[in-house]
Image (spheres, helix red, strand yellow):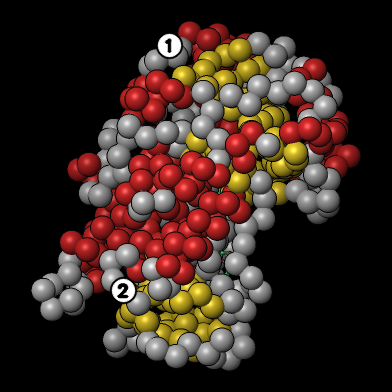
Amino acid sequence: ANPAAPADVLVVGGGIGGLSAAFALAREGLRVRVLEQAREFGEVGAGLQIAPNCTRILHDYGLLEEVKSLGVLPRSMVMRDAVDGGELTRLDLVDLEREYGFPYMVVHRSDLHGVFLRACRAAGVELVTDARVDGYENTASGARVLLADGRTDEARIVIAADGLHSVARRLLIEDEPVNSSYVAYRAAVPIGQAGRDVDLSEVSVHVGPRCHFVQYGLRGGQMLNQVAVFESPKALAGEADWGTPDELDAAFDATCREVRAGIPLMWRDRWWRMFDRDPIMTWVDGNIALLGDAAHPPLQYMAQGAIMAIEDGWVLARHVAARRAADGSIDWRGALAAYEAVRPEHCRRVLATARAWGELWHLDGVARLRRNTLLRARDTYDYSFTDWIYGPTALTPEEEPPMFTPIPLDPAMALNG
Ligand code: FAD
């Protein structure tokens, strides 16, 4: 495609982060063009959990009913021990919706991506595929991107939503993804293939030594979604070919019957090695801003990665709307500064908590038993664990709720070994 009309904003990357930001900005009347490297827009993978801090934004966008019609609204989220199968703690998702005003739900990634794609089209976003961006530069009046095929494109603002391996991030820091040595296997299969009774009114998480297993329903309960995550001995030994299917079977050998029954369903031709990055507090370089995984790729244990990306776009668009003059001009410097004042700290907290939460899930021995005792003591209706994350997305640092850390970020210390 040869972009014709000049855009106000170029968004690089058409994942959930890029598309949702493009939609949010187009909704404010801006001309937005998305540049996606792939041949087609799409999402690989399976299910996505979306918590009230995301469904609140989907409601604001007028998209919640459509997403609800595609997903599942489970009644509870239950955490169990993967070894003995015993319940550890739960969230009552019906009560949680009353508490936060918006539901906790699960949806197929490609369905949520499709909702944003259609919303972008309807809002007049220009969607360009086969456009890989290899370089960025600020100009006197905006920013320019350099495409792999030699073309260039420019706009007043460039939003880089180019994911974990972001090219744009190099403008701000020379860092590398951090290898957790954990790998995720996924499966989304018709419920008839489950081969066992699965309670689809639950989001279920089994946590075990160096492994965990998640399952929930998708597409109105027609599909079962499973995620099996484990620490790869080959990764720890420094082998390049790690996380392979033989390791999957061995990792879940010592788990309870319910978990072992799910393992044969996992897709074995694809797996996701789990990387995050250390948090960074600067996301803006002149007229170029990072968004989504490009700015803050997490380990997925908080199930907030896509949500943070969606929040980023919503916050940015709100600040743009607040800084538009009567003649339509926008104080972009102010809008980007306001975005950068609030989002990096929130995402830093989520990234740090995700790492700690993962460590807690994967404990073994006495530490595991102590964790289980603490989790069993938690009151189902105690929302102090979730307020800082499921409450309304903060637009300013003052609105950001205090972080909840009853389990200090080094769980080994808290649990005394
Ligand atoms: P991406 O989805 O990576 O999209 C980046 C896009 O940019 C892609 O389309 C890519 O092709 C394109 N691109 C990349 N480079 C270029 C370039 N140079 N030029 C042009 N285009 C480019 N999050 C949740 O909220 N809830 C969950 O339950 C959840 N579960 C997860 C489970 C697993 C196993 C994993 C791995 C992740 C999970 N996440 C979850 C996290 C979530 O998937 C990601 O955080 C989210 O998809 C990030 O979206 P993004 O748009 O920022 O990046």
* Image quadrant assignment for residue 250: top right
Mark 1 crowd level (few <14, some 14–19, many ≥20, 10 Å Cα): few
Q: Nearer the viewer, residue 283 or 388?
A: 388
Per the image, the residue denoted by label 2 is: 30
Left-right relation of 46 to 102:
right
Tell me: is circle 2 under 8 Å from ligand 1. no
Q: Quadrant of ligand 1?
A: bottom right
Left-right relation of 295 to 276:
left
The quarter of the rendered structure image containing the C terminus is: top right
* Residue 117 percent coordinates (x, y): 51, 63
* Residue 219 percent coordinates (x, y): 62, 41
Residue 313: in sight, yes or no?
yes
Outermost residue, left side: 326
Q: Is residue 370 above or below residue 332?
A: above
Q: Is residue 21 above or below residue 239?
A: below
What kind of element bears circle 1? loop
Left-right relation of 11 to 260:
left
- Write the residue at 27% across / 40% down: 400
- Write the residue at 79% across / 23% down: 196
- Write the residue at 35% across / 69% down: 26
The quarter of the rendered structure image containing the N terminus is: bottom right
Q: Is residue 67 above or below residue 88?
A: below
Mark 2 crowd level (few <14, some 14–19, many ≥20, 10 Å Cα): many
* Residue 94 percent coordinates (x, y): 43, 23
**Identity of the amino acid at label 2?**
Leu
Per the image, the residue denoted by label 1 is: 379
* Residue 111 percent coordinates (x, y): 58, 51
- Write the residue at 37% across / 82% down: 7
